Image (tube, grey):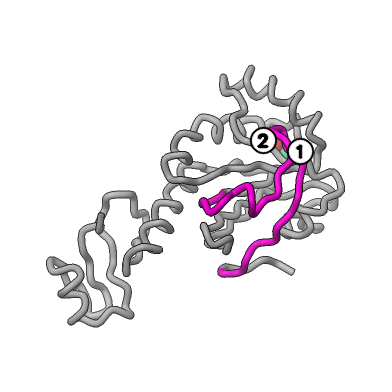
Amino acid sequence: MAIRLGDVVPDFSAETTEGHIDFHAWKDGKWAVLFSHPRDFTPVCTTELGAVAKLKPEFDKRNTVVVGLSVDPIDSHARWAQDIKDVTGQTLNFPLIGDPDKSIANAYDMIHPNASDTATVRSVFVIGPDNKLKLTLTYPASTGRNFLEILRVIDSLQLTAKHKVATPADWKNGDDVIIVPAVSDEDARKLYPDYVTKKPYLRVTKQPS
Ligand code: BEZ
């Protein structure tokens, strides 16, 4: 069954390009991005893994660990790393899980048989420090992901986990935010004294720090 927002994500043991991991213990109370790609030695995936390697310092700043997965074995991942370096200039600097028996792919519903019986789709799972699923995305094999968008949603998830706010369309870190409807006007005046009412249900304030 699909994993839904708020569920504790399945724990698993896996071999990766950086050694054995037990997922929940490995993430160790941090935020995590677990993402799958269809196969090694494929063009879109090569560009994606280079893009993630380049952004690794940005994930680190957000106390977020990153881990990739495909159904290819880790010796294949390790050989492919040289191609990723040749093409994108990036050294693989995060673990890639080998999942040849598809046990993790199946637990996370990363194989969509009407797309492909054998390859994982491009799934993204953003998982909180409490090991609960905060966000998921699914892209087809033919569409590479925008990992700046993943960083943007992590900024929103981390902000809204701490404050009684939500983020509007196309919000970027530092932009104004929305006070959640569950906060009364009286409490909003105490929490965010400079807020502006655009509609009774739409109250805007500066991003809390
Ligand atoms: C790719 O990563 O380029 C790819 C993988 C599977 C199908 C289509 C494209």
Mark 2 and ligand 1: say if the CB distance to the nearest ligand atom is below 8 Å: yes
Residue at 82% of width from left, 36% of height from top? 73
Total count of labels: 2
**Amino acid type indicated by mark 2:** Cys
Q: Which residue is mark 2?
A: 45
x, y percentage for residue 122?
66, 48
| Rendered image quadrant of residue 203 | bottom left
Residue at 79% of width from left, 57% of height from top? 106
Ligand 1 position by quadrant:
top right
Which residues, given as a range, are shown in magenta?
A: 6-32
**Amino acid type indicated by mark 1:** Arg
Residue at 82% of width from left, 54% of height from top? 103
* Image quadrant where one finds the N terminus: bottom right
Q: Nearer the viewer, residue 91 or 26?
A: 26
> Which secondary structure lies at badge 2?
helix
Q: Is residue 204 magenta?
A: no
Mark 1 and ligand 1: say if the CB distance to the nearest ligand atom is below 8 Å: yes
Rendered position, 54 above or below 6: above
Q: Which mark is residue 39?
A: 1
Q: Which of disc 2 and disc 1 is earlier in sequence?
A: 1
> Label 1: few (<14), some or many (≥20) within 10 Å?
many
Q: Nearer the viewer, residue 178 or 68?
A: 68
x, y percentage for residue 56?
51, 35
